[in-house]
Amino acid sequence: MNLAAALIYWVIIAAWLAVLATLALAFVRNPRTFGTTRLLLAVILVDTTRNVIENCYFGLYFGAKYGLFTTHLLDLLGNPALLVAPKLLNVASACLVLGLLVFRWLPAASRERIAADTRLRAQSEALEREAQERRRLFETSLDLILVTDRNGTLTSISPSARDIVGYTPEEVIGRNSAEFIFPADLDVVCNEMKLARRGRNMRNFEARYVAKNGRTTELSFSGVWSEPEQKHFFIGRDVTERNIAAKKLHSLAHFDQLTGLPNRASLHTDLGTLTTTDVHGASTAVVSFDLDGFKDVNGTLGHSFGDELLRNVADRLRSLVGANDRVYRVGGDEFVLVLSGCSDPLVATESASTILRRLGERIDISGHQFFLGASAGVAIWPVHGASVGEILSNADLALYDAKAAGGRAVRLFVPHLRARAEIRRKLGDELRRGNANEEFVLHYQPQLQATDGKVTGAEALLRWQHPERGPLAPGSFVEALADSPVAPDVGRWILATACARAAAWRATGQPIRVGVNVFPVQFRQKTLLADVRSALDRSGLPPELLELEITETIALGNDESLLATLTELRSWGVGLAFDDFGTGYASLSYLARFPFTRIKIDRSFVQKIATGAPSQNTAIVRSIIAMAHNLRLAVTAEGVETADQAKFLRARTCDELQGFLFARPLAPAAFDAFVSDARATAQVRSLAGL
């Protein structure tokens, strides 16, 4: 027992050392956790040191007394002074600890309490400011702020509800929000609330609310679920006007505003979907329509009638298409029909023909009756094209072919149409290059006075010195040239060159009139007057020696504007010849209305003149000559190739003859030689029977 009493001191020493080691290890591992409590660590260190020293003393003393250590320690440790030392140490330690507590710990604790109080006050003030800001936002927000419980019952709502949905907060608090949600949108709202309660972030979503006046208001919501409060918080922004504007923009972008039909952009989108997903598991037929003669309606009755007519056509097309088909207006009087799941060309063309027949039925608008015709081109995907652009282009090529055939017809795309278009495109490129490289030249075909064979005029005829194919006659390129962007430039060059050549003839004492064919584009762009004035001024040619040849195509397509231009030219003294008269649809009234000075009989009528030919073969020629003279118009016969034709025309008092019988179109030098060669003149007189 005495031994145990001796050992207890060493157990106490070990325990205190363990406490000290634990504190030291904790401090080394994370000094920041101690902070101002380092003072406590110092107190424990002092007390631990005191305990260790005191218990070491008593441990050694009693250990020696009970035989654990040498007995000499008893004499040393039994000294009365040493017995008092541990007690004095205990007192000193207590005083030191008390001093640390009074002078270090209490001030530090006071400072920490003050700092803590300051932080708490700052946090409290911040929370109060935040709460005030929330209340201010809640009271003044233009957006709708809603607070509901987990069941959707409204517990709070911002005053802006009065302006947005027409209800005051008092009228809706305590009621379930489902009462105000548009029924079709209720599932969306409930689903978002469930997802939020399961811990997922609530997505932005739109829902329609029924306002107090019954109007539907579209709101865009964002919100959160507060688990501690067990409440949903929503912020709803009124997007009604924004959505209306978006719908209007979509309508403007994808629908024709006149007829309400989908437009070209929608056509490309829908065709792209059909040709990539092939939703019907079959081909798709595209039918391109164009109204015949629609420009005449706008020109005679005005654009308001034209617009009303287009609306009627659109309504009629809507009534004719199937449930899976769709009709589009792609511009002007052009419409496109998409027949989904149609792979049979016969079915597609028959459908198009049926629609053309129905479109040709009478349309009544404001007391006017219309019987419009139309043309159509058909292309089938993927047989006639793999892409949207290709299939639409091929349908248009088929449409152009139908219109070229006279209109009121349906044409199915065939590959040679694409090849022909490619040839035209290539020819257009070559024409632009030819104009830039000055590859065009003029030849002149003499026009002889029928009475004496004298050269009184010359028709300027365009030739193309093609670098690869050699000299080309106008029949192989002039039609494409008339539609080419370079036509105005070439027409201007022809006028200038022909006038300069005629001025050169006049300078040599040979006042020969020059005839120039003009392009329709010169009338459409209203540049002809300026072009003629420039050519005359630069060459010095008197206007009486210039004659412009007007074809029936120009006369039929430029009524009022043509009349004003021709009248002005005639007032200058420029001659005006009606070329190829009788081959088209020109009315005889054109001869009286327009200030023509000459009629040119087309070669197709002259070719029928022959010895012994029946009188009906020459009736048209005789009638044209008689009519022209009655109208005081000169007459030139084109395409004279035989002496019999020349004699017949001279006998019928035709004024001038032109044709291969006398000369082909000649280069300028050859023409000059022909005019000045006496033998050539004698030969011409002989051929003409003079």
Image (spheres, helix red, strand yellow):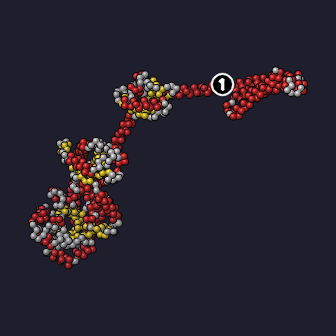
In the figure, 221 relative to 472: above or below? Answer: above
Pick the residue in front: 592 or 290: 290
Q: Residue at x 21, y 60 (%)?
A: 551
Name the quarter where the N terminus is drawn.
Answer: top right
Residue farthest along the top direction in this orientation: 1
Tag 1: Cα neighbours inside 10 Å, few (<14), some, or many (≥20)?
A: few
Q: Is residue 179 left or right of residue 652?
A: right
Residue position for label 1 = 113
In the figure, 419 relative to 203: above or below? Answer: below
Name the quarter where the C terminus is drawn.
Answer: bottom left
Q: Residue at x 29, y 49 (%)?
A: 343
Pick the residue in front: 405 or 582: 405
Can see residue 333? yes
Label 1 is placed on what type of residue? Answer: Arg
Rendering coords of residue 123 (x, y %)? 58, 27
Q: Is residue 195 left or right of residue 573?
A: right
Rendering coords of residue 219 (x, y %)? 40, 32
Q: Is residue 291 left or right of residue 57?
A: left
Q: Residue at x 42, y 30 (%)?
A: 189
Classify residue 642 by image quadrant.
Answer: bottom left
Counting every numbered tag in the picture gives 1
In the figure, 549 relative to 111: above or below? Answer: below
Classify residue 24 by image quadrant.
Answer: top right
Rendering coords of residue 359 (x, y %)? 21, 46
| Element at label 1 | helix
Rendering coords of residue 96 (x, y %)? 78, 25
Pick the residue in front: 56 or 336: 56
Can see residue 625? no
Q: Residue at x 60, y 25 (%)?
A: 121
Pick the residue in front: 443 or 260: 260
Classify residue 541 by image quadrant.
Answer: bottom left
